[in-house]
């Protein structure tokens, strides 16, 4: 009834249809009465040929009565069904800020979310001028935000390093991922808080004896410093050392008076958690010139993701448009980048919009040729993206797209009238060039970057719909190069189970779901049109990360099970040599009852894992907490096991950096160079041998006075 009150036009049409149907029903009833009377008369007159036109008249009247009903049903069905037009046909070009305002207004109205707050910043025909003077910092001979650059030794060591060293643990071969600790066989590069440090770790002449802090970059992390810089990760290759970080700009005016709490020392200011703008800074150093700063790049917006392929760097940023602000100026949030002080701003003609996506931000894909400093840009207006997957040929970024009811502007419903799907944006990459290729749609949400994989032109992706109980549906989609659906497997896992990890390896997908037991699935994808589950294994617990060791074995890291909860860190080797009959080859569980509460960052960050079959080791950070009558005890170190695919795991050592310090020492990474094992913490780098990791040979202090 409320629906009809809110939609008087539909109520009127419905009344007309009902009236017409009643009228036609009356006519049909009268025809039936007349036909009955005529039939009796014909029988009395012994006429054997009844009137044949009667059936035609009844059919005509019935059709006339049902036609408007059918038409109304069709119209309402179409009006109340979300559009599913292919996204490529909904790709719009944007030419001005006014068009973006209009797109936003239309989207908000369709979402039924339009109100004074969300539209108060939209002024017809008004664009507010705002200078970028306070946004980008000026490039100079020393990078902005650098408090000091100290060199540990008086001259550069010209000896060479080893060619045998551990790389970053990445998802795709040939696609490098940013990390907080790196090595190139000679130096170890580490980030902790606002420090980036380079330590001389190994030379072919002196081996690990040269271990010493070589260089330290300390950046300002003061929120009120206009030149503050927070390093997030690094890349290194034969020629370049690259630091990538965030540069926030805060309005440091105090919005609140001093906090009245007794233990408060400083005023509590709103600006600490609300930066007025953000930039991504990229610092490129020349390794051949003793880490001389070569190039500096600056991109406005917030960091979404990055990858590096050969000498090409790819960065994705997101710049949210705060339409709720009273003086919002879209020009200010349009994509802009700077190369060594030279500023380039995107024009509205460079922006594309996918109809149905929330037009609340600019997502920008940058391709940077490090050799030439050329930058290529693709900017998409829409919702912010998440879960980035990058192959050697394409970038895929996941977001959301909404499908509205065609008559949403006419029909007024109490609830938003739309359906949503996960949108997968595809951007082609080639030698630093970026080009938008299309967007595909799937139901559900991917868990992380490992939920996606590109193979032989197909994109494979696993998703989950729902969060609890029977409403959960786990799917595996296969999409073609145009991101059209080729095949889908549904209802993966037992009822009520969520996907905990996925790993694609060639023609197979390995999938773990969990509620109280761990179904480990082997899914055959050799025929993209007909994927099927080839093998299944049920064991307690679950793996949050899977990594192939070779064609016959997969490493799993996760948690053991205890009545549907977890009972400790679990490391497993799955034997998949027989795809139809996988089994656990070996397994270790670190029970909480023995170690106290324990954790490892590898369960959510694959780059903290070190695996080498050639060295025969697996190493990962492992921290434990215990509460006793005497207080809390904390241990942090690197857990090391020898791994052999014939005998399984054997304990090698637990490497800690505790030297009776009053402060906690967090050991967060490990690397190997030649036959030596390096562990990195917030205070030290220590080196031992791979065969005896607990016996420390050399150590260097990373503390800077």
Image (cartoon, rainbow, N blue to C red):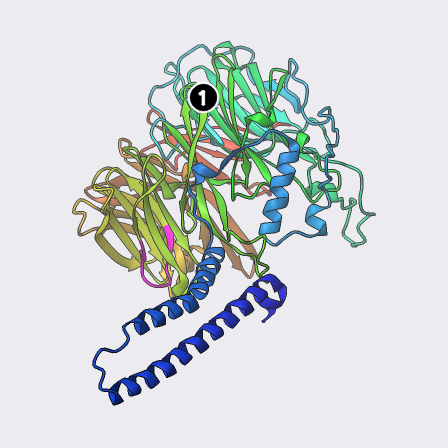
Number of marks present in the image shown: 1
Q: Secondary structure at mark 1?
A: strand
301 displayed left or right of 82: right
485 displayed left or right of 223: left
Q: Is residue 215 above or below residue 592?
A: above
Q: Residue at x 61, y 27 (%)?
A: 704
Q: Is residue 284 above or below residue 467?
A: above
The residue closer to the viewer here, 596 or 129, is 129
Query: In the rendering, at what x and y percent does residue 552 appear?
Result: 20, 41
The residue closer to the viewer here, 397 or 545, is 397
Query: In the rendering, at what x and y percent does residue 570 appear?
Result: 35, 52
Q: Residue furthest front?
A: 45
**Range shown magenta:** 490-500
Q: Write down the residue under mark 1.
A: 433
Quarter residue 102 falls in:
top right
Residue 657 is covered by the magenta coloring = no
The residue closer to the viewer here, 445 or 200, is 445
Q: Main secondary structure of the magenta part?
A: loop
The residue closer to the viewer here, 30 or 399, is 30
Which quadrant is home to the C terminus? top right
Residue 497 is covered by the magenta coloring = yes
Q: Residue at x 42, y 34 (%)?
A: 438
Q: Residue at x 48, y 14 (%)?
A: 287
């Amino acid at each position: 009834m409320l629906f009809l009150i809110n939609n008087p036009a539909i109520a009127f049409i419905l009344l007309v249809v009902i009236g017409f149907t009643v009228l036609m029903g009356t006519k049909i009833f009268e025809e039936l009465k007349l036909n009955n009377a005529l039939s009796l008369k014909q029988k009395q007159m012994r006429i054997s040929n009844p009137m044949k036109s009667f059936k035609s008249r009844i059919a005509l009247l019935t059709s006339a009565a049902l036609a408007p009903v059918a038409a109304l049903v069709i119209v309402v069905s179409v009006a109340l069904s979300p559009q599913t037009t292919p996204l490529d046909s909904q790709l719009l070009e944007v030419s001005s800020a006014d068009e973006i305002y209009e797109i936003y207004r239309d989207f908000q109205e369709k979402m039924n979310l339009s109100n004074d707050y969300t539209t108060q910043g939209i002024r017809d025909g008004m664009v507010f001028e705002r200078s970028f003077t306070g946004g980008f910092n000026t490039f100079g001979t020393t990078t902005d935000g650098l408090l000091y650059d100290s060199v540990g030794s008086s001259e550069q060591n010209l000896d060479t390093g080893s060619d045998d060293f551990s790389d970053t643990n990445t998802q795709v071969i040939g696609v490098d991922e940013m990390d907080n600790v790196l090595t190139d066989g000679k130096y170890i590069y580490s980030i902790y808080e606002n420090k980036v440090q380079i330590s001389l770790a190994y030379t072919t002449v002196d081996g690990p004896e040269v271990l010493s802090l070589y260089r330290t970059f300390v950046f300002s992390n003061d929120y009120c410093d206009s030149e503050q810089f927070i390093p997030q990760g690094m890349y290194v290759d034969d020629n370049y050392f690259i630091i990538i970080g965030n540069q926030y700009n805060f309005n440091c005016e105090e919005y609140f008076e001093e906090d009245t709490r007794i233990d408060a020392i400083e005023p509590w200011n709103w600006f600490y958690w609300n930066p007025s703008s953000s930039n991504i800074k990229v610092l490129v150093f020349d390794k051949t010139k003793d880490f001389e700063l070569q190039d500096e790049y600056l991109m406005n917006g917030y960091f979404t993701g990055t990858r590096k392929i050969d000498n090409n760097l790819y960065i994705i940023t997101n710049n949210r448009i705060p339409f709720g602000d009273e003086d919002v100026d879209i020009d200010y949030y349009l994509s802009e980048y700077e190369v060594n002080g030279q500023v380039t701003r995107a024009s509205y003609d460079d922006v594309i919009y996918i109809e149905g996506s929330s037009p609340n931000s600019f997502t920008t894909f940058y391709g940077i040729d490090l050799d030439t400093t050329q930058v290529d840009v693709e900017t998409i207006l829409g919702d912010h993206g998440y879960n980035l997957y990058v192959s050697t040929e394409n970038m895929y970024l996941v977001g959301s797209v909404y499908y509205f009811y065609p008559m949403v502007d006419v029909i007024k419903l109490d609830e938003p009238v739309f359906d949503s799907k996960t949108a997968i944006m595809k951007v082609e990459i080639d030698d630093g060039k970026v080009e938008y290729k299309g967007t595909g749609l799937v139901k559900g949400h991917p868990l992380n970057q490992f939920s996606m994989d590109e193979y032989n032109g197909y994109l494979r992706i696993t998703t989950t719909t729902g969060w609890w109980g029977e409403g959960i549906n786990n799917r595996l989609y296969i999409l073609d190069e145009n991101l059209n659906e080729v095949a889908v497997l549904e209802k993966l896992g037992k009822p009520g189970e969520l996907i905990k990890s996925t790993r694609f390896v060639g023609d197979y997908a390995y999938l773990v779901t969990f509620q109280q037991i761990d179904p480990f699935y082997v899914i055959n994808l050799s025929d993209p049109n007909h994927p099927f589950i080839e093998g299944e294994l049920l064991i307690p617990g679950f793996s949050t990360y899977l990594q192939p060791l070779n064609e016959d074995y997969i490493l799993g890291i996760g948690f053991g099970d205890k009545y549907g909860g977890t009972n400790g860190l679990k490391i497993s080797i799955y034997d998949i040599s027989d795809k139809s009959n996988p089994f656990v080859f070996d397994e270790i569980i670190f029970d909480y009852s023995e170690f106290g509460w324990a954790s490892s960052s590898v369960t959510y960050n694959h780059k903290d894992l070190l695996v080498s079959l050639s060295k025969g080791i697996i190493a990962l950070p492992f921290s434990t907490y215990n509460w006793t009558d005497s207080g809390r005890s904390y241990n942090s170190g690197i857990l090391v096991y020898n791994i052999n695919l014939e005998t399984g795991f054997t304990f090698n050592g637990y490497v800690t950096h505790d030297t009776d310090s009053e402060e906690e020492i967090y050991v967060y990474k490990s690397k190997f160079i030649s036959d030596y094992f390096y562990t990195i913490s917030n205070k030290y780098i220590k080196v031992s041998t791979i065969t005896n990791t607990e016996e420390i040979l050399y150590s260097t202090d990373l503390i800077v006075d």
